Image (cartoon, rainbow, N blue to C red):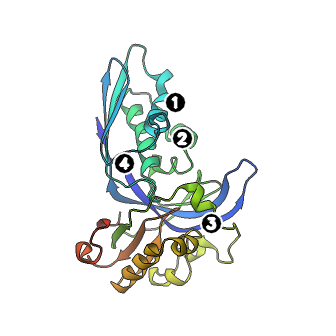
Amino acid sequence: MISFPNAKINIGLNILNKREDGFHNIESIFYPIAWKDALEACKADSFAFNSSGLNIPGDSKNNLIIKAYNLLENLIPKGESVKIHLHKVIPMGAGLGGGSADGAFALKLLNELFKLNLSEAVLENMAGKLGSDCPFFIKNKPVFCYDRGIKFKEIALDLSSYKICVVNPNIHISTAEAYGAITPSVPENILMDDIKAPITAWKDLITNDFEEPLAKKYPKIGAIKEQLYNLGACYASMTGSGSTVYGIFDKEIDTKKHFEGLTTWQGQML
C-alpha cells in the first residue's frame, strides 16, 4: 500500500507569544501543495523502516514515521507488523512540513493497512503527539491554524487557478534558530480578514514573522523573494521557519534559467 505525503506552505505566520509549556502560540494559514514524498507500507513479520532519496539526518529514533508506528503498535493485530519505505523528495528543515506530512500519512496508511477504523479526530489527536504541524495533514485541507499549531478552522480558500513556484536555497534552519531570531507580538492586522483580500493585495497585508530576521542573516532568502516578484508573482513569501520561498503565479516560469543551482519545484495549486 502506498501514499504520497505532500508539502504545505504558510500564507502568513504570526508568532503571538510564548506559552508556559515552552511552545509558542501562532496563527497562520496552512495550504497544501503537490510536492510529494512517497511512502509504502507492507505487512511483515517484524517492523522495519528504510528510506531512499534525500538523506535524512539525525537519530532514526526521532523519525516521525517510526514514532507514528510506535503510537499504533499496540492496536496492530498480534503477530503482525509492517515494513515501511520512504522515498524522500521534500527538502528537510525548509519550512515545508515534509517530515510532519510523513508522520501523519504514516498514521493514515497504517490505519488503512490494518483496518484499525480510527476516526479522523482520533488520528488528529495522535498526530498532535508527533509534532505541531502533523494534525494538519490528516484532513490536508486549507485551514486557519492557531494555538501552538495543532488547532484549525477550515477556510474557503481556493487557489487552484494559480501556479506555484517553490525555491529552496539549500539553507537548513532549525526551529530553535528561527525562534531565537524573533520577538513575539500580536499583529495589528487580522489574518483571517486579510486572506479574503485579492491575492495581489497580500503583499502589503500578509507577512511571516520569521522572514525579516532570517533574510538579514541569509540574504539569499530575500534575493529569491525579490526575484519571484520580478518574474511576476502575485504573492511571494518565505514559508514556515524557512528557508524555502514560494511565489504564486498566474503563469509558469523558467525555474532552471532563473534559479540555477537551487532546489525548485513548480506545479498547479491544489
Q: Are marks 2 and 1 in contact (CB under 8 Å)?
A: yes
Tell me the residue that label 3 is attached to: 181
Q: Is residue 37 above or below residue 226?
A: above
Q: What numbered label is drawn on residue 251?
A: none
Q: Which of marks 2 and 1 is nearer the N terminus?
A: 1
Q: How far apart are marks 4 and 1 (CA)?
A: 19 Å
Identity of the residue furthest to the top in this view: 79
Q: Quadrant of residue 66?
A: top left
> Is 161 or 249 nearer to us in this picture?
249
**Residue drawn at 38 percent across, 55 percent down:** 91
Q: How far apart are marks 4 and 2 (CA)?
A: 15 Å
Q: How far apart are marks 2 and 3 (CA)?
A: 25 Å
Q: Earlier in the sequence, mark 4 or mark 2?
A: 4
Mark 2 is surrounded, within 10 Å at the Cα level, by few (under 14), some (14 to 19) or many (20 or more) other residues, namely many
Q: Earlier in the sequence, mark 2 or mark 3?
A: 2
Residue 125, x across and y down, in percent: 57, 40
Mark 3 is surrounded, within 10 Å at the Cα level, by few (under 14), some (14 to 19) or many (20 or more) other residues, namely some
Q: Is residue 180 above or below residue 207?
A: above
Q: Which amino acid does label 2 sit on?
A: Leu
- Secondary structure beneath dot 2 equals helix
Tell me the residue that label 4 is attached to: 5
Tell me the residue that label 1 is attached to: 71
